[in-house]
Amino acid sequence: MSFQEERVLKMMEQLPQNDNQMGYNAVIPVVEWEFSDTGDPVKDRRRNIKNALKALKPEKRWFAIPGFGLLPFIGGARFRYGNNSNRCVVTGSDCSALSYGDLWDKYRPDLFTPYSKVLPGAGVPLVGTYSPQHMQLYHLLLQWIEQENAENDKGFFKRMKKKGVSFIPIRREEVVQTNPLLNKWSEAFMEAEKDGIPIIHYKNPVTGENDLTMLVFDNRMLNATYERADTMDGKAYETTSEGAQVN
């Protein structure tokens, strides 16, 4: 545990509401976030973008000069938590044991680089990450900006017309026939695929459609395989009131 985490834990244990609950061994950052709700979707989205950029900016390092007040450090040293791949660049929290869920495959450390001005390629690249809740906010931010850019591209139809492309609005209705039992078990097959459990399909030789689907549970393989982890240290954790525990 780092000095930063020990300091935060001691501060938490001194709070009145935690007076009788000693023995914490981890800190999980929680982002307090309120979505804009004015009733105007465009205005709400722009406010959310502005607030998200502010909330996701990395923590800076400051120093004091008599007569000048607080000033930020220059160069790479100006960011307090930008030199450790397992730490959140906003809070400095150790994220190696925190679960990222569905975001892990897209934003794990070898695929994601945080920047000093938040957006990809904006400012200085940092060595670090976001906590799971900060990462969820970052994911939403990218979606909001993509929607904003799509709506602001007013010259799109002009450019397409010059290329000889026109668009005709149509109404298309798709009838999807689903089997309730198949819907119920579809998530089970998806989880099995993630964990590497073999799935065997038997197709009809005449129609080519799938007739049979089998999950193969090999006890030898299961005993040698661990649950798929979505944390930086490759372990599976469960979070309790006493902190993070390894499964």
Image (cartoon, rainbow, N blue to C red):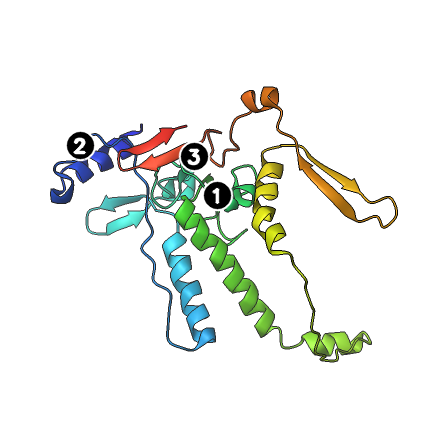
* Residue at the disc numbered 3: 86
Q: Nearer the viewer, residue 49 or 218?
A: 218
Q: What SS does tag 3 mark?
A: strand
Asked whether the beta carbons under mark 3 and mark 1 sit within 8 Å of each other, the answer is no
Looking at the image, residue 68 sits to the left or right of residue 187; the answer is: left
Q: Residue at x 85, y 50 (%)?
A: 207
Binning the other alpha carbons within 10 Å of mark 2 as few (below 14), some (14 to 19) or many (20 upward) gives: few
Can see residue 156? yes
Whole-percent x and y of residue 62? 29, 45
Can see residue 125? no
Q: Which amino acid does label 2 sit on?
A: Met
Q: Which amino acid does label 3 sit on?
A: Asn
* Residue at the disc numbered 1: 101
Q: Quadrant of residue 80?
A: top left
Looking at the image, residue 20 sits to the left or right of residue 204; the answer is: left
Looking at the image, residue 157 sits to the left or right of residue 32; the answer is: right
* Closer to viewer: mark 2 or mark 3: 2
Q: Distance between the residues labelled 1 and 2?
A: 29 Å
Binning the other alpha carbons within 10 Å of mark 3 as few (below 14), some (14 to 19) or many (20 upward) gives: many
Q: What residue type is labelled 1?
A: Gly
* Closer to viewer: mark 3 or mark 1: 1
Q: Quadrant of the N terminus?
A: top left
* Residue at the disc numbered 2: 22
